[in-house]
Amino acid sequence: MTTTRTLLDKLPPAARARLLECSRPVRFAPGTRIFRQRRRADRFWIVEADRVELDVHVPGHRDAAVDTLTGGALLGCSWIVPPCLRHLGATDVRALEFDAPAVRELCADDPSVGETAFARVAATTARRLQTVRGRLLDGLALPHAPELLSHAR
């Protein structure tokens, strides 16, 4: 089960319906840049179909892929805590887009939504940081990289 589907599934039906009222279906053509680094994060998405390649800009080099998301995944974690700046880019997806300010207001008004949303975003962020960390260590080809990873868990 993906992190974001867990977000929707963990909510009581009335809270889920209120959250979904803050969303709309969107489709991005292949190759479309959904968001850029250092831009305001005023929305987030649940990937419904296709895949999203997350990348990060590396000055002096081409952008580096850091993760691939598929159906049910949360895209855009920066929305939850202001100042809400994006740090990654993404391409190729059909998704459910959420109005982040409206969802933050809903989180403040309804503790069941707020607690669930914060928990899911934190879990998603932690998983992605571990993925990136592992890829960085793999890229460095350190002989003790598996030891470092096991100590972090």
Image (cartoon, rainbow, N blue to C red):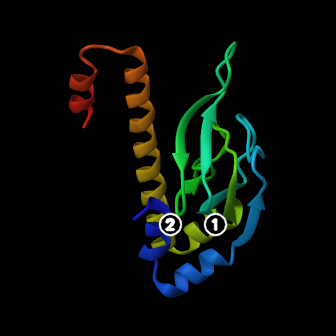
Residue 128: x, y in percent?
45, 42
Residue ranking furthest to the bottom: 14
Looking at the image, residue 22 sits to the left or right of residue 147; the answer is: right
In the rendered image, the quadrant that contains the N terminus is bottom left
At horizontal 36% and vertical 15% (from top left) the residue drawn is 141
Residue 127 x/y as whole percent: 40, 45
Q: Is residue 14 above or below residue 45?
A: below
Residue ID for mark 2: 114
Residue at position x 54%, y 79% from top? 16
Rendered residue at 62%/49% (across/down): 52
Check the image and report above or below for 26 versus 54: below
Q: Position of residue 51 (x, y in %)?
A: 60, 53
For the residues labelled 2 and 1, the Cα–Cα distance comes to: 9 Å
Question: Element type at marker 1?
Answer: helix
Q: Nearer the viewer, residue 13 or 63?
A: 63
> How many C-alpha atoms fall within 10 Å of the one at disc 2: few (<14), some, or many (≥20)?
some
Q: Which residue is mark 1?
A: 103
Residue 113 in the figure: left or right of residue 61: left
Looking at the image, residue 87 lies above or below residue 15: above
> Count the marks: how many?
2
